Amino acid sequence: MTPDRWLVLIGGLSLVAFIVWFFWMNRAKGVKASETSSGHQEVMVLVKGGYTPDTIIVRHGKPVRLNFRREETASCSEKVIFADFKKSADLPTGETVPVEFLPDKPGEYEFGCAMGMFRGKLIVE
Amino acid sequence: MGKVVEISGDAKRSVEAVKQAAQPGVTHIDLVVGGMTCRHCPPKVEKTIQDIKGVKAAQVNSSTGTARIDYDPNETSASQLAGAIRSAGYSPGTAKTRFLIKNMHCSSCVVRIETALQMTPGVVSARANLGPNAVDVEYQPAVVDFDGIRRAIESAGHKIIEPEPSQIKAAVEDDVDPEEAAREEEYRGLMRKFWFAAAVSVPVMALSYPDLIPGLRDWMPMGSETRRIVWALLGVLTFPVLVWSGSQFFTGMWDGLKHRSANMHTLIALGVTAAFLYSVVAVAYPGMFPKIELAEVFWDVTTVVIALVVLGLALELKAKGRTSEAIKKLMGLQAKTARVIRDGKEIELPVEEVIAGDIVQVRPGEKIPVDGVLTDGSSAVDESMITGESIPIEKQVGDEAIGGTLNKTGSFKFRATRVGKDTALASIIRMVKDAQGSKAPIQRVVDLVSGYFVPTVMILGVLAFVAWYLFGPEPRIVYATIVLVTTLIIACPCALGLATPTSLTVGIGKGAENGILIRSGDALQTSEKLNSLILDKTGTITRGEPALTDVVPNGGFDEAEVLRLAASLERGSEHPLGEAIVNGAQERQIELTDAKKFSAIPGHGVRGLIDGKEVLLGNAKLMRDRGITIEELNTNWERLAGEGKTPMYIAVDGKSAGLVAVADTVKPDSKEAIKLLKGMGIEVIMLTGDNQRTADAIAREVGVDRVLAEVLPDEKAHEVQKLQLEGKKVGMVGDGINDAPALAQADVGFAIGTGTDVAIEASDVTLIKGSLIGVVTAIEISRATMTNVRQNLVGAFGYNAAGLPVAMGLLYPFFGLLLSPLVAAAAMAFSSVTVVTNANRLRYFEPKRSVK
């Protein structure tokens, strides 16, 4: 093996390790929903290339209102779906759309776009 | 002008006066609250309102749907109250309209107009805007009308630009769907980017392979300075393609990376960047390469890949727009204006302003604007767009009119009962949209894959590069680069992601077009697998109301005479069986006479005098008690009872005159539907609370083999469960009211609705037209959609599974085959278009037997 080959091999493998670490490990911590005067646990979610925040922590038994605001035109993100709560909402670009539901069982619930490219997690405590 | 100023001064004073008057006391307001459909709603709304600071008292009346609120205007406002109702999940019954204002130039005018409007009873909020010279008013049509608002604006010293009725119409009709407009705009943007990339691609392609073109080969030989300069110029040309035509790939990649996620954009952006950077190095530092042949450029890869993928995105966008055609059609059904009669005058209003209780006039050929009940006139109405029923329905006073349907022949007036988002059409649209946004269970597999897909492709690309660099043929660096770029570009996560949702959208839309509301992707997927279907008898297989079926004359009477006597007698009765006899006689156009001395004999029947003769109608006991011989009718009585009918004896002046029989009759297409269901391999079971004999008779008539009779209402769910324990996928068809637990227990619950009653909660599928054929169509649609989904998934998975190894060069050692990045780009772009196009094929689905 010539030195350039060693270089490419080591470089390639470290790149693979980086991809694995970057995309699959080291998930961001969730954001706790704050309770508003109307009795809802509210969180503002920005939709742009993903959900910010993408992990939301709420308490069970209290109504949740997630205000989605989509700031992109990619058609993938035009819907957000909470399959476990049978809820979905159209997200027109530039509008804030509230999604309301009542999580009554603790657990982790995924939400995302219709194609599953964008995903977020709702942790019910 | 002077006059206007004068009025303005007055108005200022009057506004002040109102403010003054309002200060110490308490203001009263009646707000209309929409959406209070449940028993616990009114107290909930009341509580919500009472919790607002400044509210003295609040009382909600559920029958009128209004909230009477006393509040202190210094502490809260009508718009706050309306906002609270809205946040509690109900709609304050308000309308929004924009008024154009003349000569509104200063910000003080804005304040003045807003204040004047806010002081007007019935106005919930007002926001004036200098830009368009308009004020947006949210108001309660029940309290204040256009005139009231105009007076308020005039009192503030301004005039509104009076819109002509035709202008109102035009303004509301010109309303372009913003989603549609955004989609169109994006499409045009993508096409501009495509044409630019395509135009640049032509010279770039030609000049990138000078060795293949005789004239160019000599003009710019390999390693020459000319070639380097030409290639550098091509690079300059390619750069704008990369940063402009390909911009969405970079922004898409960046947005994703911020969330530590990767998408299609990531792959394309990395691929074209790799190709571009290699070319830059090749032109800038050709000396770096051991051989001059290695100093190749891939400008063509950059431009052509971007052109093709952008074209693919544009085509996909176009095709996706078509998948939601059904919902657009439904939204297009909504009438824009309504002729409402207020204060005895007929006025044309935008449909948003019609309130429940308004009397609406509909002329022939017009759309019915909202839901209601006919109060005057009659007509035939085409309801095909809602129910799928193709024959126009005759409507008389007291019948329901459905908003969005088309009035054909006569003109009539009706009282609006449900308006705005409460109409059947609005509920249907909402339900279809919700369903289209739901996920089929099959999608979960895809979701699992797509989370790992893109990073995996990136890893494969890197590994392929390393492998080719280590073991590949010379020039290794060129081959390795080509393989890396091709691998990144050929992978198509979009095809995977689009496979299920696009088919689902089309399939559920198709259902709505046929009067079938499929409530979720789950229901759609499960319907396909049903192998057992339980049909409730009453109201599902049968009409659910008795009708006259047989007349058997006796003792010298003829059929018409027997029926005339029976119906004339029963006209005074309010018994449903009696009603059936009267209706039967009217259908046969028999003239009825009045009965005298009518009396009901409880548990026996009725008696009365007709044309001076004493007529008796009732059961055998009634006849025997009066010593009337009925033995000669025994065979007929037995036969009719055996058919599940209810026969009644009739006697005239102490002599038996015959039998009339009534029964719950089978709907005309039940038999055909059951035959079709059996043909589809589904076991059909009838479930009823009726006795075995009646049940068997109906079962024989419609061709059902298995009957579960004498089942108490609360046992129905249990029967469903028993079948499920046999390992069957059980569907249940019922009316959704008495059968709710059974519908919920079944794997798929089909509710048979009628007319405007579509919001049946317990069901997975609602059949708007009360025909069993709808169940057949629903299952057909489910099967067609799921087949389509499977085709898409197999195609998308197969494409990626086959494309990736080829791109990585696995075939090269055996066949010397290596994919060009250009071919990979074309394949990738068209694979997602193919998936969407295949889903669109579902639009041409026709049910074998449409609901008639």
Image (cartoon, coloured by chain):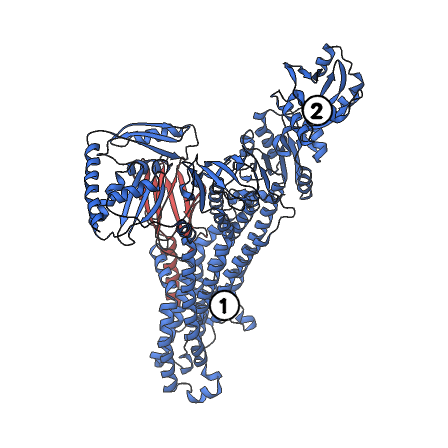
Residue B120's x, y, as percent?
A: 28, 38
Q: In terms of depth relative to the viewer, which is nearer, B341 or B129?
A: B341
Query: From the image, which quarter does the C terminus of chain B lie in?
Result: top right
Residue B568's x, y, as percent?
A: 67, 22
What mark, if any, has residue B138 been given in the picture?
A: none
- Residue A32 visible to the viewer: no
- Residue B655 visible to the viewer: yes
Mark 2 chain: B
Residue at 49% across, 87% down: B214
Q: Amino acid at mark 1?
A: Ala
Residue A96's x, y, as percent?
A: 34, 48
Q: Amino acid at mark 2?
A: Arg
Q: Quadrant of residue A105?
A: top left
Q: Secondary structure at mark 2?
A: helix
Q: In terms of depth relative to the viewer, which is nearer, B553 or B754?
A: B553
Q: Secondary structure at mark 1?
A: helix
Q: How many marks?
A: 2
Q: Quadrant of residue B736?
A: top right
Q: Colour of chain A?
A: red
The residue that label 2 is drawn on is: B564
Mark 1 chain: B
Q: Colour of chain B?
A: blue
Q: Quadrant of residue B131?
A: bottom left
Relative height, residue B330 to residue B459 (above, below): above
The residue that label 1 is drawn on is: B826
